[in-house]
Image: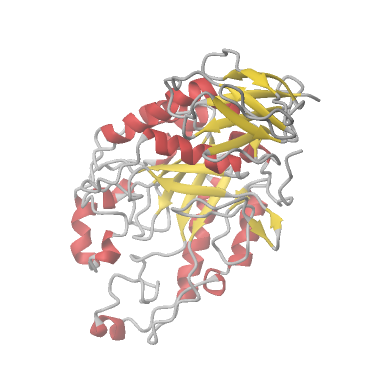
Amino acid sequence: MPKHPEPTIGDTSWFVHDRFGLFIHWGIYALPARHEWVKNRERICDEDYQKYFDHFYPDLYDPTVWAREAKNAGMKYLVVTSKHHDGFCLWDSALTDYKATNTPWGKDLLRPMVETFRAEGFKVGFYHSLLDWHHPEFPIDGLHPMRDDVAFREAQKHRDIRKYAEYLHGQARELLTQFGKIDIMWFDFSYSERDWGWSKGRGKDDWRSEELMAMVRELQPGIIVNDRMEIGGDFKTPEQYQPRGWMEVGGKPVVWEACQTLNGSWGYDRDNLDWKPVEMLVQMLVDTVSKGGNLLLNVGPNARGEFEPRAIERLRGIGEWMRLHDRSVYRCTASDFTPPPGCRYTQTGPERSRRDGNRLYLHLFSWPFRHVHLDGLADRVEYAQLLNDGSEIKMHVLDPSQEASLIFMRGTPGTLTLELPVQKPPVAVPVIELFLKE
């Protein structure tokens, strides 16, 4: 029987059912198109960064197109950057002038996105940066774009993180009270362990994390919150790597979500060519679910407000696979059975419906010649089929007492052998659906 993760304060029941979400990183960093950390990486001062604010005009922005592409890809929830580390806000915040409504575009970008995705059946969440390199009270530390300007650092020693924390809490309150039901708050990030000698990193005491978390849960009962405020949360968030197994805290499995990019950047990065192929992206989704996790897959829209063609191509490729195989993802989790090499199992979860039954899904990352051997499944499976077309896969329990010969294999006790077609099915990752005996 698949295991349960540790209970959470927020309602993660829908989260572990849906498994696949869309991450969107979008802001004025789409104009330089050199990564969302461009202000940090290139040590750009506010005055020089202002040109991106002054020329932000996403005239091709149409959230209905974004929602349609995400829905066709099989995604079930949205997490979008309300504000990234550069401090620019997508909504008409009453607490700052540094927002989309004051750019040449002149309109709120967040509200139509939330309303459109929600109308398509998506759960909706906000990524909100705990840092703010634009705010006049956010201290100059070792991650700040002005960190190497000693004279500027000295002139700005009076900055008061307590005043910034009031702003942070105030904006979080706006997001949680002005956009209807919010399903996820995704705060990013804490770094109190960092020490540059002349400055230290920021963490839970600076953000007043306990107070912030209490406000979030009070304003949006049932909301789920990530783990980057140094006080835990409802789910873990490994970034840009795939864990070796189900993530644990204190030796116990927890709810978790891998966040990954389509190429090597979160924000639009014109010249980053590390685009992952569809097959790899599908394998990442399967690998995540096979370890009890979710996948939050990112798109960085460009400065005109569009998903670029390479992103759309990949979303559609994932969508074609999901159209045929989504029941090996939704409602599924890790299995207690051990898959053969080069394969992953997912299994219908403990809360499966009677219609779902007890099904085990074998995902073959590499296609073997004619046979695949499933240890521990002899006499456990009543029927097997390829999921892409519903065609039967023959099953055999080979006799372990029979010596191997020219044309006969020797069996292994407890092993079920599946007889496969020589040709790999025409899908990114073939899946065999195994109907387990109750």
For the question of whether residue 76 can be seen, the reply is yes
The image shows residue 269 at horizontal and vertical percentages of: 26, 48
Give the residue drawn at x 44%, y 26%: 319
Q: How is the image coloured?
A: secondary structure
For the question of whether residue 330 can be seen, the reply is no
Give the residue drawn at x 39%, y 48%: 92
The image shows residue 217 at horizontal and vertical percentages of: 65, 53
| Left or right for 29, reference 372 | left
| Left or right for 237, reference 140 | right
Q: Quadrant of the N terminus?
A: top right
Question: Quarter-wise, where is residue 371 in the image?
Answer: top right
User: Compared with residue 330, is residue 290 higher up or lower down, i.e. above or below?
Assistant: below
Q: Between residues 57 and 338, which one lies in front from this camera angle? A: 338
Give the residue drawn at x 46%, y 53%: 241
Give the residue drawn at x 40%, y 72%: 138
Q: Between residues 395 and 280, which one lies in front from this camera angle? A: 395
The image shows residue 4 at horizontal and vertical percentages of: 74, 45
